[in-house]
């Protein structure tokens, strides 16, 4: 009997780890790889080697044809960076149908809504889009070889509204037993330690990074004094969640549920996550820790806060400093409420849409 096929868009860290994970559950990963050279090499190999938390050589199928991907795979995981979602959606749009369901595998805030709204603008209807977070701490060692240093034991998933999330209960859990349905899209999008911590950690250590003085990003990125800045950002995450009818667990509990660690304080939690001892600082400031998390989480969070009449001074500061430092207009290019289709809605109307 042939294995059921599951689509994966991407060939980077998350996509490679996901392919091995799905293959270990007796699915055949069909990897849609946009880079023709990488696609050719992976197709020739016909398998993905995995070391670390998962060991083995796993069969894969590779395609560079979006029509083939959409025809062969009912379920398609987008495991690219969040910045690439709309480019991928553009390529898939002509071939998607009601038989396809898309799962964003590192959604950030309201990614499923952004992709749904984009597909609707291309006259694509009936395609459900779900989201969760990337569940693997992994690094590609070479083409066709990925090292998984950590696998999250818990996370949330969501559709664009409550009824869609409920409709898919049990589906994603069959692939990832630790997943739980979120109360709504905002709870899922703000339960993301990377989005909370990456931009600020990089900014407060930017001189060390520019001088190429490497350090352990989470273990050594904060002092007892500087972690108070991160705690203030966490307070703003919680305030926005409450304004949209949901609540967040403390970030130190996210880390404990992900990987296991101390919960005495947020600083101690970061410094006791086992696989964070491998997490080196980036080698440049112009890095996805800002380029992905600022436009795809902090910008929509800031705009949702404004709709609710909330102030977010720490989030505002991170956006401003990151924009100046990188010379990017993140508000113009980010995941704005206009790109979500929510710009004309009131705070109350957005809450209604979330809970539909």
Image (spheres, rainbow, N blue to C red):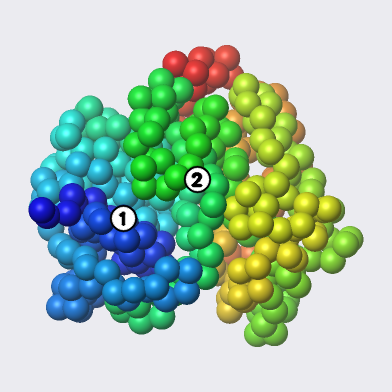
**Which residue does the image show at 30% across and 32% down from the upper left?**
128
**Which residue does the image show at 39% across and 73% down from the upper left?**
55
- Name the secondary structure under disc 1: loop
Q: Is residue 332 above or below residue 183?
A: below
**Which residue does the image show at 41% across and 24% down from the upper left?**
166
**Measured from the top left, where is residue 265 in percent x and y?**
82, 53
**Which residue does the image show at 52% across and 70% down from the upper left?**
149
Q: Quadrant of the C terminus?
A: top left
Q: Left or right of 315: which side holds 75? A: left
Q: Label 2 belongs to which residue?
A: 178
Q: CA distance from mark 1 to mark 2?
A: 15 Å
Sequence-first tag of 1 and 2: 1
**Measured from the top left, where is residue 308 in percent x and y?**
65, 23
- Name the secondary structure under disc 2: loop
Q: Is residue 155 above or below residue 164?
A: below
Question: Is residue 34 in view from this perspective?
Answer: no
Question: Is residue 259 in view from this perspective?
Answer: yes
Q: Label 1 belongs to which residue?
A: 25
Q: Is residue 321 above or below residue 158?
A: below
Q: 328 or 348, which is in the foreground?
A: 348
Q: Left or right of 162: which side holds 40? A: left
Q: 186 or 28, which is in the foreground?
A: 28
Q: 312 or 16, which is in the foreground?
A: 16
Specify few, some or many for label 2: CA neighbours under 10 Å numbering under 14, 14-19, or 20 or more: some
**Measured from the top left, where is residue 185 in percent x and y?**
50, 32
């Amino acid at each position: 009997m042939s294995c059921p096929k599951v689509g994966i868009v991407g060939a980077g860290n998350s996509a490679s780890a996901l392919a091995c994970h799905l293959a270990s559950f007796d699915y055949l990963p069909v990897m849609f790889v946009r880079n023709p050279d990488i696609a050719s090499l992976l197709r020739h190999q016909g398998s993905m080697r995995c070391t670390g938390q998962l060991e083995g050589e796993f069969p894969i199928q590779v395609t560079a044809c979006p029509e083939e991907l959409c025809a062969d795979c009912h379920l398609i995981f987008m495991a690219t960076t969040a910045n690439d979602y709309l480019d991928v959606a553009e390529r898939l749009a002509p071939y998607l149908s009601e038989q396809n369901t898309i799962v964003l595998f590192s959604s950030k805030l309201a990614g499923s809504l952004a992709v749904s709204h984009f597909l609707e603008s291309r006259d694509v209807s009936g395609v459900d889009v779900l989201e969760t977070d990337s569940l693997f701490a992994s690094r590609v060692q070479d083409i066709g070889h990925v090292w998984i240093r950590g696998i999250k034991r818990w996370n949330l998933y969501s559709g664009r509204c409550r009824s869609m999330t409920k409709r898919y209960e049990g589906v994603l859990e069959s692939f990832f037993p630790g997943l739980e349905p979120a109360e709504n899209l905002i709870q899922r999008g703000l339960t993301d330690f990377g989005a909370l911590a990456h931009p600020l950690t990089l900014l407060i250590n930017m001189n060390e990074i520019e001088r190429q003085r490497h350090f352990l990003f989470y273990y050594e990125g904060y002092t007892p004094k500087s972690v108070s800045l991160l705690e203030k950002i966490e307070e703003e995450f919680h305030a926005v969640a409450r304004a949209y009818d949901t609540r967040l667990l403390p970030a130190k509990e996210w880390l404990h549920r992900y990987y296991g660690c101390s919960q005495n304080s947020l600083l101690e939690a970061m410094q006791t996550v086992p696989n964070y001892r491998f997490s080196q600082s980036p080698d440049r400031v112009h890095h996805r820790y800002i380029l992905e998390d600022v436009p795809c989480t902090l910008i929509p969070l800031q705009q949702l806060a404004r709709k609710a009449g909330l102030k977010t001074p720490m989030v505002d500061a991170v956006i401003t400093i990151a924009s100046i430092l990188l010379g990017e207009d993140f508000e113009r290019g980010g995941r704005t409420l206009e790109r979500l289709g929510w710009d004309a809605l009131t705070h109350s109307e957005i809450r209604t849409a979330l809970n539909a």
